[in-house]
Image (cartoon, helix red, strand yellow):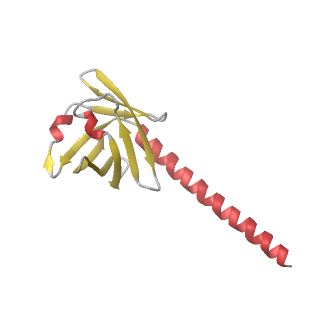
Amino acid sequence: MKLKIYLFALVLGTSISSCKKLVRQQEQNAAIQIITNGLWYVQTYTNNGADISSIFDGYVFQFKQDGTVVGTKDNISISGTWSASIPDRSITSNFPNATSPLNKLNSVWKITDSSVDYVVANATISDSTENLRLQKK
């Protein structure tokens, strides 16, 4: 009898664990689909409270499912990488050879608010607090 209860508990625990993994994977897939569908631009960027959004004027960003991102302005494109962590509510971006302003996006960004057409995030970069709002075009 004890063996049956143990086996039942083991099967139930495995099923619950599998369901949680499936739900997390579905959440991750849905987020990736939202991020990679369309073009994004920097609507707001502040550095220690100072609005420096205008340095991103004209840039659009295409996030791709293979983990690459392309920032384009005036037909000049710069490639980087990105990854999302749904459990951590964060996005990591890196433009390894970029200069300003794209190098300002190199960080782990903690998402504080989001929808299907915007993301609000912040990061600490070199002892300064950066705030970012990406908007879908």
From the top left corner, tell me how far across and down residue 129 is, in percent.
Answer: 22, 52
Residue 87 higher or lower than 117, as above or below: below
Determine if residue 53 is in view.
yes
From the top left corner, tell me how far across and down residue 71 is, in percent.
Answer: 31, 30
Q: Residue furthest top?
A: 75
Residue 61 higher or lower than 122, as above or below: above
Residue 9 position by quadrant: bottom right
* Residue drawn where x is 65% and y is 58% of the image: 18
- Residue 90 lies left or right of residue 53; in this view the side is right
Residue 5 higher or lower than 122, as above or below: below
From the top left corner, tell me how far across and down residue 109 is, in percent.
Answer: 34, 49
Q: Nearer the viewer, residue 33 or 111?
A: 111
* Residue drawn where x is 48% and y is 36% of the image: 65
Q: Nearer the viewer, residue 85 or 43?
A: 85
* Residue drawn where x is 43% and y is 38% of the image: 36
* Residue drawn where x is 33% and y is 33% of the image: 61
- Which quadrant would the C terminus be assigned to in this image? top left
Residue 54 position by quadrant: top left
Determine if residue 114 is in view.
no
